[in-house]
Image (cartoon, rainbow, N blue to C red):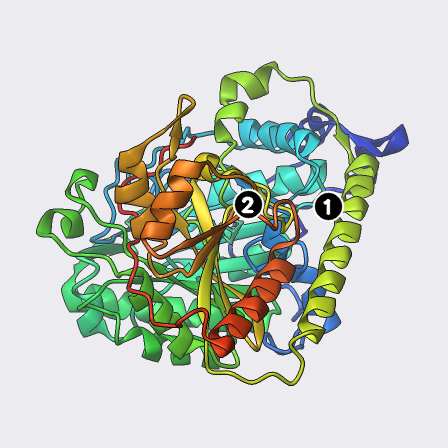
Amino acid sequence: MSSPIIPLSGVVRPGGIIRLEDVLQQMAEHKGCGTSSEGGKASCGSSAGPADMSPEIWEKVKNHPCYSEEAHHHYARMHVAVAPACNIQCNYCNRKYDCANESRPGVVSEKLTPEQAAKKVLAVASTIPQMTVLGIAGPGDPLANPEKTFKTFELISKTAPDIKLCLSTNGLTLPDHVDTIKRFNVDHVTITINMVDPDVGAKIYPWIYYKNKRYKGREAAEILTQRQLQGLEMLTERGILCKVNSVMIPGINDQHLVEVNRAVKSRGAFLHNIMPLISAPEHGTVFGLTGQRGPTAQELKALQDSCEGEMNMMRHCRQCRADAVGLLGEDRSSEFTTENVMAMEVEYDLESRQAYQAVVEQERQAKAQAKQAEMATLAGDQSDIKILVAVATKGSGRINEHFGHATEFQIYEASTAGAKFVGHRRVDLYCQGGYGEEEALENSVIRAINDCTAVFVAKIGGCPKAELEAAGIDAVDKYAFEYIDQSVIAYFREYLEKVREGSVVHGQRGDAEIRQGAYVAA
Ligand code: CLF
Ligand code: SF4
């Protein structure tokens, strides 16, 4: 079978400009959409181990905001919601909304055709030059909608050739599509694996629909786990980087996820993303209605810490919507509605995107050097003390957000080993219409960062600062617009000095809450 990919040279205009119309015209003349999973067998790609970060793997992850924590401060992703159908039922999902394997419950995305999706990608890429990854993550399962999913990838690989392609799936039909995934140069695949024991699976999945038949309970879970692990093995054998998402459901699979971690690590997964169950009655899910709780912030962190070994743990996932646009943690999807996008004249200018990204790289290197220099001041120091610091940021790895404008805080663990990103906490906006909202401060922000010793902000008013101090959280604006890692290390060094001289008493802080409500963009 011939490759479905048509030659790029046929659609590149002088100056490196590529137009969607030219690509669509060529594809209309080209027979077959190439979405079959048969034939076209690709040769095995990278032989490098997924955990050893060979130059080849670094090349794949360095600009991917989900696969590299450090990259997520600088590079953006976008999703296109082209895949409405699903072939399984998860007890944390209400099908009125997006696939909860990557999205927070209660979020609805605008569905697109592949052609609309391709135009949207060009529109976003022209507006946000640091957008480097296009993912398909719903609103159902991308591989339950293979024609739409692969047609979209094909269009985008022609019109925006420097954008990495990414896919997220429940894995049921994954083994049938691995060769097609390889052929379309989809380098990053996420599989949601919540269990490897069908008895656990029967509590999470009421049914699956497989080969024209509905299976229930343990039998359904047995088929699902077998297909997921087979798909994972097939992908890693072909050099495709795999991330595994797992939803942590206290009392159901929380202990079991350590075993899941071992199983996926041994099959070559590159990254494990353990996400909290977000569950509330208003989501209308089985778990929401039965009162199944999600984990606390410290329960989640403890599980992630216990799984952290040779395999990287992802801790910066934002459980984004199926039409998310922008840096992780920001939501610019409302700027790119179908109506807006269809009215836009867009051209894909590869050169100016590359020039912009070169500037981003310089900033990234400056940040790394600043961190290294600050770490030198802690060299040789040993202490068991660890503290958490919450940071208000709009991106670029800097403390550049006002306290009142933050809809999330990034959480760093500081110790003599340095500054380590360990998560983020969504909060209600404190500043509403120019005024501080007392309720948001007490019921949302303080609860979300209650386990933190300090909060770093670009600016903060006297009232919230005093209330945070009363809750035992040091509100710090002296590092405004500085790099986060460098500032966290500097603060920790001073903290340690104060503990040693006796002016500060170090003690364990309490736990914190993970926000359960559906996200509302600011
Ligand atoms: Fe999208 Fe997922 Fe690709 Fe990222 S998201 S398909 S790997 S480009 Fe990222 Fe969003 Fe978490 Fe997903 S933060 S929900 S892990
Ligand atoms: Fe919902 Fe996604 Fe599960 Fe399908 S795979 S039931 S869309 S959460």
In the image, residue 429 lies at what x, y percent?
38, 35
Q: Nearer the viewer, residue 157 or 400?
A: 400
The amino acid sitting under disc 1 is Asp
The residue positioned 59% from the left and 47% from the top of the image is 399
- Identity of the residue drawn at 51% across and 83% down: 383
Secondary element at image label 1:
loop
Earlier residue among tags 2 and 1: 1
**Three-letter amino acid code at the position of disc 2:** Thr
Residue 104: in sight, yes or no?
no
| Picture layout, residue 405 above or below residue 457 | above
Outermost residue toward the left in this view: 290
**2 vs 1, front mark:** 2
Residue name at image x 17 percent, y 68 percent: 251
Can residue 350 be seen from the camera position used here? yes
Judge from the rendering whether residue 307 lies leftward or rightward of residue 95; answer left or right.
right
Q: Which residue occupies 70% across, 30% down?
A: 126
Q: Which mark is residue 162?
A: 1
- Looking at the picture, how far across and down is residue 171, in whole percent? 39, 60
Q: Gap in Å between the C-alphas at discs 2 and 1?
A: 28 Å
Q: Position of residue 231 (x, y in %)?
A: 45, 67
